[in-house]
Amino acid sequence: MTSFRNISRRDFLKFCAGTASLLGLSEAAVPRVARALEGAAKKPPVIWLEGQDCAGCTISFINSSNPGTAELVLDTISVRYHETIMAAAGHLSEKALQDTIKEGGYVLVVEGSIPTVDPRFCQIAGRNFVDIVKEAAGNAGAVIAIGSCATYGGIPGDCPPPGTGMGVGEAMDKGLIPKKPLINVPTCPAHPERFVGTVVYYLLYKQPPPMDKIGRPLMFYDKLIHDNCERRGHFENGEFLSDWNSFEQRNWCMYLKGCKGPFTYADCPKRRWSDGLNWCIGCSSVCQGCSEPTFYTGMAPLYDKTQEIRGYRVETIGAVATGIVAVGLAGHFIGQAMTGRLGKGGPPEEGGDN
Ligand code: SF4
């Protein structure tokens, strides 16, 4: 049996119950989750590579608590190579990487984008990052791309020229690295629960979870932010924040200030961040659309309204917010007309459009 350091049985079972609900399973599945976590006679090996990243996804993961999610998962899987948290360095760490690659069957986690146009970018131990990922993906059982940069290129991906930072899926499509089952876990940074849920699903079912057309697990990315936003009532009423300094408008809808919630699929309103403490819109920052492939350039400028909700002239609604037009009637009409029909072609179905 795997031993979980510093974590009581009660906390462990609490974690299992939380993870079961994360996966959409009933309470009856808790013992099964517990068995999958503690019963793995041979802990699945993991190689975690960092390319063009800020290590934010790693920090997000190891800072999670209630109970120590990182500790539980790191005790459940066997992280053989991780540049930020491994104790070994130099030749020892490279040997650990090579030994694991030879063994095969591991899960490869890639954090950060992959530069492909200039060999001087992102060299590790004298080798180009793209060559390291190519070698490590070769014998991997599955690949998890974690964070916006590794999934779709993110901020480095938008630096000229094209190919300066490429997502794992695109690198696979272009034949730069071998094609393997790929799970994309975007946002900047990645949410620790979405990573843990993905890993536990893989341990339970020995296959990737059901995903949308762009490789995101549906259990975390099947709804628009806008659909579950706590400010949606203000949107429906035509109450749009136009003045950051207005006390009255402090909780109003931020669509006119550039919120990308109507175009972004993720469960942030429900899952929230920092152990459920708050989330972007909860602390009066617009949704920046960081779970979408078009992040960053396609969502910038972040505090400008750059996209229209299909079929609606929201400037008219903005006038409503400033009190020029009858708020209640217009808001009610608009809300009724818009319910459930926002975004880029509707909610993604498994293998469906996004
Ligand atoms: Fe919430 Fe943004 Fe939608 Fe407004 S536009 S309801 S702030 S997600």
Image (tube, rainbow, N blue to C red):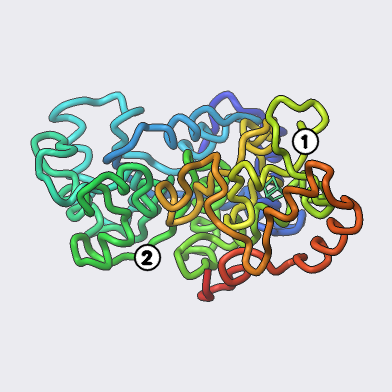
Badge 2 element: loop
Taking the image as shown, residue 152 lies to the left or right of residue 122, namely: right
- What is the residue that sits farthest to the bottom in this orientation? 352
Give the residue displayed 61% in from the left and 40% down from the top.
286
Q: 127 or 139: nearer the eye?
A: 127
**Residue picked out by circle 1:** 251
Instruction: Give the mark nearest the N terminus, 2 or 1.
Output: 2
C-alpha span from label 2 to label 1? 42 Å
Q: Residues within 10 Å of mark 1 (few under 14, many from 20)?
A: some
Residue pictured at 37% horizontal, 65% vertical: 181
| Closer to the camera in the image, 189 or 33 | 189
74 w.r.t. 34: above or below: above
Q: Which mark is residue 123?
A: none
Q: Is residue 38 visible?
A: no
**Residue linked to disc 2:** 181
Q: Amino acid at mark 2?
A: Pro
Question: Of residues 126 and 214, which is closer to you in this image?
Answer: 214
Task: Answer whether residue 118 is visible to the viewer in this image.
Answer: yes
Q: Point out the frontmost of discs 2 and 1.
A: 1
What amino acid type is highlighted by mark number 1? Asn
Q: Position of residue 264 (x, y in %)?
A: 57, 55
Element class at badge 1: loop
User: Is the C-beta of the residue carrying label 2 under 8 Å from the nearest atom of ligand 1?
Assistant: no
- Please, which residue is most extreme toward the front here? 324
Identified at 72% across, 33% down, the residue is: 10
Residue 133 picture location, percent across and down: 22, 51
Give the x, y percent position of residue 101: 22, 50
Q: Is residue 139 positioned above or below 160 on the image?
A: below
| Front one among 222 and 86 | 222
Q: Is residue 40 left or right of residue 15?
A: left
Residue that appears at 73% across and 67% down: 340
Give percent across and percent down for residue 299: 48, 49
